[in-house]
Amino acid sequence: MKRSSVLNVADRNASVQILDGNHAAAEGAKLSRVQVVAAYPITPQSPVTETLSEFVEEGNLNAEYVAVESEHSALAVCTSASIVGARTFTATSSHGLAYMHEMLHWVAGTRLPVVLACVNRAIGAPWNVLNDQQDSISQRDTGWIQIYARNNQEILDSVIQAYKIAEAVYVPVMVCYDGYILSHTEMPVDIPSQEDVDRFLPPYKPHTTLDPAKPRNYNLVTLANPRVNAEGVLCHGYMEIRYLLQEALQNSRETIARVGQEFGELFGRSYAKMFWEDRLDDADIVIVAMGSLAMEATVAADMLREEGHKAGVLGLRVFRPFPKSDLVKALKKSRLIVVFDKNISYGLEGATCSEIKSALYGSGANAVVRNFIVGLGGRDVKARELADAVKKSLSSMKEGVLNNEYPEWICEI
Amino acid sequence: MGTRECKHICGESSQGIGEAGRTGEWRSARPVIDHDKCTPARQNKPACFLCWLYCPDAVISKTIPVQINLEYCKGCEICAQVCPTHAITMVNEEEFSS
Ligand code: SF4
Ligand code: SF4
């Protein structure tokens, strides 16, 4: 599992190493020169915390590693460290993320650019340690930007970009990647040099100041209406502060695209789009998936193409802010959209499917939308199953019926 | 002009009386001090001041006699509870409005 053979890439100051997803996340945090790391180990995230504490112990990362007794405390430490001007990092999974729930709101509400790696894992009950995306999807409404990686390279790249995005718009960023499928699977990862990352990522400039010479109080009781402060200035009520959080997320789309583009110019891997497109140009059938499932979907699209179907894949990368208008443009030509979700909003359907349908409303799109719940609790998802689900949707399409009441499940009930 | 002019992006304030708003408006009962019972007033000495120490809004003065700033006293009753001489009584606000 150790970082192994180093192979120099001729034209850039980078090296390719064979890394699993957790090491890629830790490398990303190290290259971002994080100053405070506070985390609590949980399967399958534990190697992230172990690697970072090794980095600090060996003197390879000049950071304070705070060992805490819970995830709630981990994020509380990051909150305090971020508010006094430190670049902070934490990582967790599943029940750990659920335990952070309250602090997720505090971080976003205080507009602190904390970066969190969420190693996606199913949530109880019953106990399960394997992958799905229910944990991060359940935190959708906490005001964090959510980015999903398809492979280990994207994990490392996304962590570095996350700091640049978060510190520009003052919104925290969650970088999500699938447990085991990515976290414990090794693949070649191009690691940029520290000098290049330093050129890309400027030091953190906090919007808050804690200075005894200029005392400030943050997150005081803020009631419904605006009020005049001790200096006679009319200050926000609770609602205005919450409006600004929404506004920041809405506006963050431009920043995410700009940062992704700049990253591409410097490192040769562009992230200028909020989602990945695979053969959408001529596709009339589009498979939508998020995270590593989007990679599996391209194999399914290959199968469908071989069988004569014009299939393409839209891999969602940024889930919050949701790229509504861009997505509508990309899906404009499709007549069938099949959305695979590794999560469900119980009583309705998969979360990404709902978002896509809401984006399409009023766009004039006339595509049939079908939703399949797959891969919960680590259930293996085969490309063949995805392709078959698309074919099943095709054959059951009825004139004028665009929407189904509930999703279908690929399981053995 | 909206609240954007304050330039804050999260809840923040500087030090000052009334930063949390006029908390006196929250009060449903008012602490009333009987200075015949209150130790500093009775002995004309800076003594006791437990109410000053415990008031969470810091609206009680450490003076002779002790005074309460009713603009910001939120009526929590802590002062009345800690007073060893039972000098403070909580009186329903309605009795002052009539
Ligand atoms: S302790 Fe409570 S009731 Fe007493 S003066 Fe302070 S705020 Fe008012
Ligand atoms: S606690 Fe009671 S006795 Fe002591 S100073 Fe306050 S009102 Fe007076």
Image (cartoon, coloured by chain):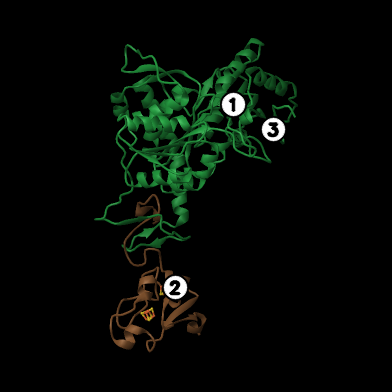
Q: Give the image location of residue A274, x and y in percent.
A: 48, 29
Q: Which mark is residue A407?
A: 3
Chain given the colour green: A
Select label 1 or label 2 by which is in front: 2
Do pointers 1 and 2 mark residues of a single chain?
no
Q: Which mark is residue A288?
A: 1
Cβ–Cβ under 8 Å for marks 3 and 2? no
Q: Which mark is residue B78?
A: 2
Q: Residues within 10 Å of mark 1 (few under 14, many from 20)?
A: many
Residue found at x 46% / y 27%: A22
- Which chain does the numbered disc 2 sit on? B
The quarter of the rendering in which ligand 2 is drawn is bottom left
Q: Quadrant of residue A222?
A: bottom left
Q: Residues within 10 Å of mark 3 (few under 14, many from 20)?
A: some
- Please, what is the three-letter code of the amino acid marked with disc 2? Ile
Q: Is B12 above or below relative to A276?
A: below
Q: Which mark is residue A19?
A: none
Q: CA distance from mark 3 to mark 1?
A: 14 Å
Q: Give the image location of residue A161, x and y in percent.
A: 39, 30
Q: Quadrant of residue B69?
A: bottom left
Q: Earlier in the sequence, mark 3 or mark 1?
A: 1
- Please, what is the three-letter code of the amino acid marked with disc 3? Pro
Chain B rendering hue:
brown
> Cβ(mark 2) to ligand 1 < 8 Å?
yes
Q: Is residue A258 found left or right of A280 in the rendered image?
A: left
Q: Is residue A133 found left or right of A249 in the rendered image?
A: right
- Which chain does the numbered disc 3 sit on? A
Count the labels in the image.
3
Select label 3 or label 2 by which is in front: 2
